[in-house]
Amino acid sequence: MADTILKELTLKVWRQKDAKSKGGFETYKVHDISTGTSFLEMLDILNEQLVSENKEPVAFDHDCREGICGMCSLFIDGRAHGPDDDVTTCQLHMRRFKDGATITIEPWRSGAFPVIKDLIVDRNAFEKIQQAGGYVSVNTGGVPDANAIPIANEKAEEAMDAAACIGCGACVATCKNSSAMLFVAAKVSQFALLPQGKIEAARRAKAMVAKMDELGFGNCTNTGACEAECPKSISIEHIARLNREYLKAKLKD
C-alpha cells in the first residue's frame, strides 16, 4: 500500500520542566506528514519546527529505534506505545492515524517513574529491581558449550519468551495500580525455568519482590492490562510462576 500524506495533525503534548514542577498540555500542529513516517520521526519533525521558531523542543526518550531497547516510552491516545499492537513507540507508524486527527502524547504515569522532563521519565527503579536479584552468579572463565547442560526445548522456549522483556515499563504505565509484576515475573521466570537459575531461585524471588514493594510499585489485581499492552506479548502466566516461586521461597524460611 502506497504511503499517503497527512495534511494536518494536532498534537497535545505534555510539557513539564521536572518532577517537582507542575506540567500541562501544549498544543502544536504539524503538516504534510507521510504515513510511512515513524512516530518518533514525526516528533523529530515537530522539534525541527519548534527550533526554527526559537522555541524549546519537546524532550522525549529514544535510542535504538528498532524496538529492542525499551527507551521510547510514550502514552499515546490513552495507550502505552500507541494504537498498534505488539510494537514499541519507535515501531509505530503514522499510517495508524487519520488526517486531521488530534493525538495526545503523555509520559508514563507512575510514582515509581518520576518525570525528568516533558515525555522522559526515570525508569531507574527497574534497574534497582534487576540489581536485587535478576542475575545468576557464576565463576568467570571459559564459555561452556551451548549444549553442555541438557534443557528441554519447551522450557528453553518459555524462558526465551520471558527474556524477551525489554524493560520499557508499558506494563506499569497501563496497570491501574502501577504494578511491576509482569516485569519482575519475566525476569524471575527466565531463570526459574533453567537449571542455571535454580540454585539462587529462592533468594532471587524474595529479593526482587521486596525491592519492587520498596520502590512504590502497586499490587497486581489480575486485570490483565499489562499483558494486553506489552510490546513483546509477555504472558501473565509468568506472574503465576513468580507467585509460586515466591511462595516456595517463603515456605523455606
Image: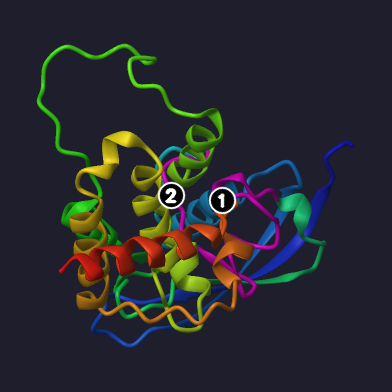
View extreme (front): residue: 252
Q: Image quadrant for the C terminus?
A: bottom left
Q: Secondary structure at mark 1?
A: loop
- How many labels were placed on the picture? 2
Task: Using the rendered image of the protein, determine whether residue 214 is visible from the camera's viewpoint.
Answer: yes
Q: Quadrant location of the N terminus? A: top right
Q: State yes or no: discs 1 and 2 in contact (Cβ < 8 Å).
A: yes
Q: Which mark is residue 70?
A: 2
Q: Is residue 210 above or below residue 182?
A: below
| Res 181 quadrant in image | bottom left
Q: Residue furthest right?
A: 1
- Specify the segment rendered in magenta: 66-93
Q: Residue at x 30, y 62 (%)?
A: 123
Residue 59, can we see it? no
Which of these two is toward me, 217 or 88? Answer: 217
Q: Residue at x 50, y 51 (%)?
A: 48
Give me the C-alpha separation between circle 1 and circle 2.
Answer: 8 Å
Residue type of the residue flagged with mark 2:
Gly
Q: Which residue carries the number 1 mark?
A: 88
Query: Which of the marked residues, 1 or 2, is nearer the chain's N terminus?
Result: 2
CA neighbours of label 2 inside 10 A, class few (<14), some (14 to 19), many (20+): many
Q: Is residue 201 above or below residue 124?
A: above
Q: Position of residue 134 (x, y in %)?
A: 25, 49
